[in-house]
Amino acid sequence: MNTVDEICDLLQAHSNRDKIVSLTSYILKLWGASSKRQNLLTASANLASARAALRLFDDAAVLNNILKYGLGKQDGPWWGALGVSNGLFTLAYLQAEKIVFLLDTGVLTLDEEKTFQIRTAHKLFWALFSFIGLIRSIRALHVSAQNLKDPNRTKCAPARFTQATLTSTKLVLDVIHAVSWLPRGWLWGSSLQTSHAAAIATLSAVLGLVTHYHGKRLLPR
């Protein structure tokens, strides 16, 4: 019964359900690419499309985070600017995704060059907010490492360091994966094989769940 309750709690929230769908999609993609089974790749693509469709309604949550963060003065000029940029790139990514959705469904028709530019911008915004997220997570990792060395550290300091390490590792994988979707000539864009990119994304999705459950240990009881 506890297991069923845990699964229900996990799937109840949109962000947590997305982690499960993401992991399933990437496992199917890795399996399909490795075994050259088109039916598995199709199943993976359908789940990815479902995730993309649900992200069409994420604007309110992102806007709420942007407004709460404000101009980031609490983090200083450099880190505050990064925090603001992270929110704006995330919002830009969501708007580009809406246009991609309209293109994919045939509601919007553009010439080939503009379509390519929009799809590239979509992936670029993804790579940018992932990279900024990584930079900010490294700062959090550094702070947690410093706290770990403090003789008067709190009992949760080791757990916070582990959480920061998991988050940074996941974001490294996210950056590698996001950039791999960019056109050839953009860093390592379009250079990874499908199975390699799927393996990286699968590992990132697994770390996402591990980070989620480990983070629950840091919540007040």
Image (cartoon, rainbow, N blue to C red):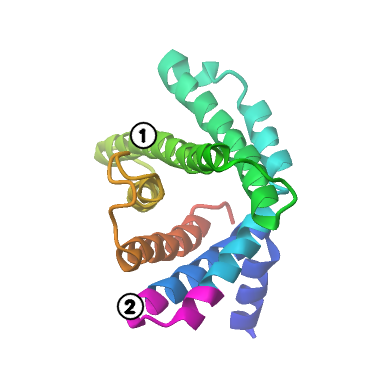
Which residue lies at the image location 61% right of the left edge and 40% below the top edge? 96
> Which of 22 and 83 lies nearest the eye of the viewer?
22
In the picture, the quarter occupied by the C terminus is bottom right
Q: How busy is the neighbourhood of tag 1: few (under 14 within 10 Å), some, or many (20 plus)?
A: some
Q: In which quarter of the image is residue 214?
A: bottom left
Rendered location of residue 54, percent (x, y): 69, 56
Task: Reply above or below: 64 against 189.
Answer: above
> Which of 113 and 86 lies nearest the eye of the viewer?
113
Which residue is denoted by mark 1 in the rendering?
Answer: 135
Disc number at residue 34?
Answer: 2
In the picture, measured across the screen, residue 199 lies left or right of residue 68, that is left
Which residue lies at the image location 48% right of the left edge and 55% below the top edge? 215
Check disc 2 and give the amino acid type: Ser
In the picture, measured across the screen, residue 54 lies left or right of residue 20, that is right
Which residue lies at the image location 64% right of the left edge and 41% below the top edge? 110
Q: Are marks 1 and 2 in contact (CB under 8 Å)?
A: no
Mark 1 residue element: helix
> Which of 153 and 76 lies nearest the eye of the viewer?
76
Residue 32 drawn in magenta: yes
Mark 2 residue element: helix
Disc number at residue 168?
Answer: none
Check disc 1 and give the amino acid type: Ile
Q: Which secondary structure type mostly characterizes the magenta part of the structure? A: helix
Residue range in magenta is 31-43
Rendered location of residue 146, percent (x, y): 28, 35
Task: Reply above or below: 92 against 22.
Answer: above
Mark closer to the chain start, 1 or 2: 2
In the picture, the quarter occupied by the N terminus is bottom right
Count of numbered circles on the image: 2
User: Is residue 183 something one can see in this rendering?
Assistant: yes
In the picture, measured across the screen, residue 112 lies left or right of residue 153, that is right
